[in-house]
Image (cartoon, rainbow, N blue to C red):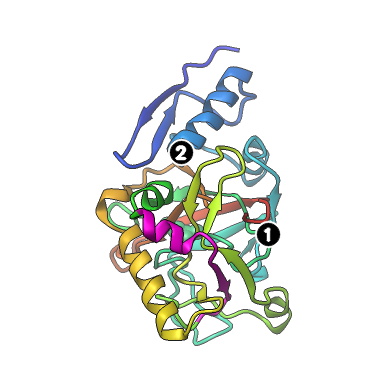
Amino acid sequence: MTEALTVTRLGDALGVAAEGIDLNQPLAASSRAALRQALLDRLVLCIRGQSLTPGAYLAAMRLFGEPITQVRQAARHPEAAEIMILSSEDRDDLGDGKRLVVGAHWHSDDSYKAVPCSLTMLYGVEVPVSGGDTQFVNMYRAYEDLPAEMRQKIAPLRVIHRYDSSRKGTRIAALTGAEAQTVPDVVHPLVRTHPETGRRALYMNPNRMEAVVGLERSESDALLDALVRHATQPTYQYRHHWRQGDILIWDNRCTMHKANGDYPEGARRLMHRIIVAGTVPA
Ligand code: SIN
C-alpha cells in the first residue's frame, strides 16, 4: 500500500489536517494509527479531499469507533440510518416550521444522553463559498487555565443536562413524542477525565445544561455563565472554513463547537453527520 499521508496543524489552540489519503481505499496500519493519534493530540481532525458514497463514508468512520443512530428519525439518511443529514434547507418541521441551523450555539454533541457519543464526523458534501464555518474550543486548556481555587470548587460538581434546556442559546429541533421519551434528563460531571488521554477537561454544553445539582438557581446560572465565557475566549478557539470534501472529526469529550448559519440566502450547505459510541463521563 503506498500512501502519502501528511498531517499539518490548523489552529494554534487545536485542529489538524490530513491529506494524501483516499478513504475509498483500505488504509495502511501506520496511517490509521497516525490519524487516531492526530485526533487525540489535536482534538479536531480534518481529512481533506474525500468523495464518498454514504456506505463508504460509514465504513471509513469505523476506524474511529462504532457509529450509532441519532435521535431525530426524520433527519436520517435513507441509505444509512447512522448518517444524519444537516442541510441549509432544514426546517423545524415538528415545531414552528422555521429555518433551523442545527448547533448554532456552543455545545458538545449528545450530552443530553446518559452515555454521550465520543466523536462526531461531519462530511462537507456541499459547502457554501462563504460562511457556514464551524468553530471549536479546546476544553482541556480552558480547564487547565482556571485558577486553582476554581478548579477545586468545580471538581465535585454535577450538572443536569436536558434536551430542551431553558438555558439554550439557539433554537433546537422539536422531537416527536416517542423521540422525546428517549431523552430524559441526565446528570454529568462538570469536569471529566478523558478515557484515552487521562487529561481533565471542562465538560459543558451551553445548549443543554439546565442547572448545577445542589446550587441555588441564581448561583448555578452565574457559575455556568462565567465558565462558558471563560471557555469560549478566542485564545481557545479554532474556526474551520470548509472545503468541499472535508471530513471533520472532533472529540466531544474535550471540545465544544458551534455552527454558523451566516451563508448567503440560497447558498447550499449539505453535511453528512455521524456520531460514534462513547462511555459514561467520569
Ligand atoms: C453540529 O453541531 O453537529 C453541526 C456543526 C455544523 O454544521 O457546522
Q: Is residue 161 magenta?
A: yes
Residue behind mark 2: 45
Quarter of the image where one finds residue 151: bottom left
Q: Which residue is mark 1?
A: 115
Instruction: Using the image as rendered, state which of residue 25 and residue 121 is in the foreground.
Output: 121
Q: What x and y, as percent, mark residue 120?
A: 55, 50
Instruction: Assess disc 2: are there few (<14), some (14-19) or many (≥20) residues with their C-alpha within 10 Å of its C-alpha.
Output: many
Q: Residue at x 43, y 37 (%)?
A: 42
- Whether label 2 touches label 1, CB < 8 Å: no
Q: Is residue 182 visible?
A: yes
Give the vertical position of 74 relative to 3 (above or below).
below
* Left or right position of 26 against 102: right
Which residues, given as a range, are shown in magenta? 148-165
Residue 147: x and y in percent read 33, 55
Q: Residue at x 32, y 42 (%)?
A: 13
On the rendered image, what quadrant is the C terminus found in? bottom right
Q: Amino acid at mark 1?
A: Val
| Residue 222: image location, x then y, percent | 36, 77
Seen in the picture, residue 97 relative to 270 is either above or below; the reply is below
Q: Nearer the viewer, residue 12 or 135?
A: 12
**What residue appears at the point 74 percent right and 80 percent down from the top-left corner?**
178
Name which of mark 2 and mark 1 comes first in the sequence: 2
**Residue type indicated by callout 2:** Leu
Packing grade of label 1 (10 A; few <14, some 14-19, many >=20) is some
- Let me know if residue 261 appears in the view: no
Would residue 11 appear left or right of 176 to someone viewing this image? left
The answer to whether 208 appears left or right of 259 in the picture is right
- On the rendered image, what quadrant is the N terminus found in? top right
Q: Is residue 99 magenta?
A: no
